Amino acid sequence: MANAITLFFIAMLVCCTNNILVSAWNEPAEEVIHVGGKVMCQDCSQGYNEWVKGDKPIKGAKVSITCWDKRNRAVYYTSDTTDVLGLYDMRVNKYVNGKELDVKRCYVRLVSSPDDVCNIPTDFGGGKSGFKLSNPTSVYRSLIKYIATTFYYTTPMCDMPQTDNSYGSEAKDPRGQRQGGY
């Protein structure tokens, strides 16, 4: 009688394990990763509190992702536009030309803003230079999602002028000699 009970439990274990393996085998693997984030407008012409807390979402801002291979060649590019809340969600193929994409070599950056006033990209959060993907923000079953930091556009009045690293304000010719002045 003990052998019959043991055989019954072994048979049940095999059936349950087999069902789990079959269901896992039939579940399609996700072939994409998701990259999301937010694009906002920050206006420096307001007071400090409004500047810090007064950012507004930009609808229709374009954000792109570019992925590079080990030889620094672009192997993947896609873009998306933001919704009313300034949110975007790009679907990135995990496999390009039969090879798995190296996500750590992907950069998300700002492309354009439809706003007539708030259209100067800033580098807050890496929006201008590119936000490098590193570790997924969420992983659930076959869903892998990366969330980039919030990107910001600003108004032309708030744009910082490009400056060089020299201490003097006088122009120099290519030989290093000063030009003009007294």
Image (cartoon, rainbow, N blue to C red):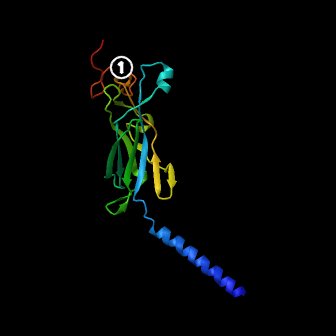
Q: Residue at x 39, y 59 (%)?
A: 31
Foreground pick, 173 / 123: 123
Q: SS class of the residue under badge 1? A: loop
Foreground pick, 44 / 126: 44
Q: Considering only vertical position in the picture, is 169 above or below 85?
A: above
Foreground pick, 100 / 147: 147
Find residue 143 and report its horizontal and vertical position in percent.
46, 55
Three-letter residue code for mark 1 = Ser
Find residue 94 and report its horizontal and vertical position in percent.
39, 57
The residue beneath circle 1 is 169
Q: Considering only vertical position in the picture, is 144 above or below 173?
A: below
Find residue 138 and report its horizontal and vertical position in percent.
51, 50
Counting the numbered discs, the total is: 1
Classify the position of the C terminus by image quarter.
top left
Find residue 70 and report its horizontal and vertical position in percent.
37, 55
Which residue extends farthest right?
A: 2
